[in-house]
Image (tube, rainbow, N blue to C red):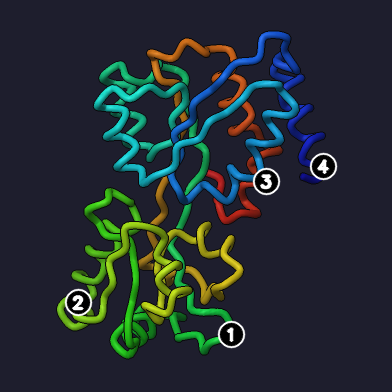
Amino acid sequence: MTKMLFAVIAFVLTAAGMAVVANAADVKLFSPAALRPAMSELIPAFEQSSAHKVTIAYGTAGALADRIQKGEAADIAILTGSQIENFVKNGTVAAGSQINVGKIGIGVAVSKGTEKPDISSVDAFKRSMLMAKSIAYLDPATGGPAGVYLASLFERLGVAAEIKPKTKLTRGPAQDAVIRGEAEIAITQITELIAEPKVDLVGPLPATIQNFTQFAVGRVTASKEVDAGTALIRFLTSPPVSQILKAKGIEPG
């Protein structure tokens, strides 16, 4: 962990009036897997600087929302903006606690060192998908925003039927299918591709068919760790941390 990161966290916590506390709390955070690369760096530093302990449960936004809906205990939840808003409306997330974290687009990757397909335009992207031997993306049934969007995108582009026989729908990270040699191309949220050294990022989807998933954070109403949870939310949504998130592929918004 860099000294700069610790300095940023200490500044944020002090500015929020929540520097290291005597009564450390255990905070349970639900976070989409697309944010794991950022959380794996930020949360340990937050713990060391604040003395709070954070336990993270990762999954697709859909699966995490379902777990909360069924009553599984959590203190803080990062979900899509619409999911957080719905939870605020039904009282599951405390009103006024919700704040946008950032938005993540979709990217394309191939195995390290292999030839990169042309995705410079929508037509080029379509041709590359039709020419590819195999394509992996997250199964829409998991509730992951990227998988849901890609299924509709291929239908809209008129290539769904042609690529279906060579499509591998994954239950976990799509890039893992490329790493294992099960697929030639992986398409998923760009944060996951940037963080994986065993694949090469080809680039984001063309702008006119790009889809950004807006993520927001909120405090679960039933949480007993209000102060610690609020400190974590303030930290994750602070301007200095936003710059760190951007470096991980998470755009402000």
Q: Is residue 150 above or below residue 25?
A: below
Which mark sits nearer the N-terminus, 2 or 4? 4
Q: Which residue in the structure is indicated by mark 1? A: 113
Residue underneath mark 4: 4
Callout 3 secondary element: helix
Residue flagged by tag 1: what amino acid is it?
A: Gly
Q: Which residue is mark 3?
A: 243
Q: Write the residue at 75% across / 17% down.
A: 20
**In the figure, 179 relative to 32: above or below?**
below
Give the image location of residue 65, x and y in percent: 31, 34
Give the residue displayed 58% in from the left and 12% down from the top.
Answer: 227
Percent position (x, y) of residue 107?
46, 67
SS at mark 4 in the image = helix
Q: Position of residue 72 (x, y in %)?
A: 33, 25
Identify the image quadrant of the N terminus: top right
Residue sitting at x 25%, y 56% = 140
Distance of mark 3 from mark 1, alpha carbons? 29 Å
Q: Is residue 130 left or right of residue 246?
A: left
Q: Residues within 10 Å of mark 1 (few under 14, many from 20)?
A: few
Disc 4 residue type (three-letter): Met
